[in-house]
Image: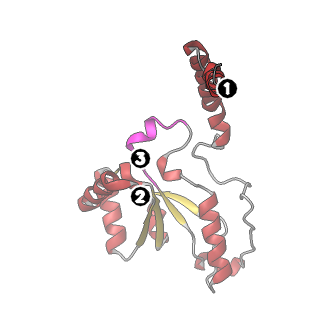
Amino acid sequence: MPSPLKGIARKKRSIFGRQESFWWVLTILTTHFLCDSPRAQGNRRFQQPNDDRSGVPTWEIDPSHRSDLFTFARIQYRSWSDGYSRWRKKCMIDWPESDLNFSYRLEELTSLKVDPDGTVVSLTDPTLFDYPFVYLIEPGEMILDQEEQAQLRKYLLGGGFMMIDDFWGNQEYAHLESTLKEV
């Protein structure tokens, strides 16, 4: 008499028993995930801030203090993978959500007056020096030309503070280190 376990094992194998079935299922799943990924990632390219604050509340600013506010300033830069990334540049990861949330928490938990909108600034923008604090995210593939290096050097030697966040592994750290040594 055949063992009942052999029949169960055979039935389990028969789901993907034919190689063609496996490849059809794999093709359908891959197509689904590739077609659905833009929606999952928000299908957002670099753009100026819009009214979507991702649930972060806004607050009023006293017009007399407009020039005396802390503004969260994100650095815009080029990277190796910008040409390959259809949806978002590396320097814009988590934008605007993280910038808005950081600004909101700073306003909420300190006595600082904080701009509710923040800004994105390039290293060659003359307004860079209006922001004593700048944020640099995912710099593991960052590319700086000589003008950007000179401006960043001038900014940092002039007392500017740069927060660097979110790079992965030794290779990206080594690239960041060599890039900053050129500054």
- For mark 2, what is the residue? 123
In front: mark 2 or mark 1?
Answer: 1
In front: mark 3 or mark 2?
Answer: 3
Across and down, in percent, residue 174 comes to 28, 56
What amino acid is labelled 2 in the image?
Leu
Q: Residue at x 60, y 30 (%)?
A: 34
In this rendering, does residue 66 appear at all? Answer: no
Q: Earlier in the sequence, mark 3 or mark 2?
A: 3
Camera-side residue: 46 or 22? 22
Residue 167 picture quarter? bottom left
Range shown magenta: 76-86
- For mark 3, what is the residue? 78
Q: Secondary structure at mark 2?
A: loop
Tag 3 and tag 1, C-beta contact below 8 Å: no
What amino acid is labelled 1 in the image?
Pro
Give the Cα separation between the discs numbered 3 and 2.
Answer: 11 Å
Q: Earlier in the sequence, mark 2 or mark 1?
A: 1
- For mark 1, what is the residue? 4
Q: Residue at x 31, y 51 (%)?
A: 171
Q: Which image quadrant: the C terminus?
A: bottom left
Camera-side residue: 17 or 116? 17
Q: Around disc 2, counting alpha carbons within 10 Å, would you say few (fewer than 14), some (14 to 19), or many (20 or more)?
A: some
In the image, is 25 to the left or to the right of 143?
right
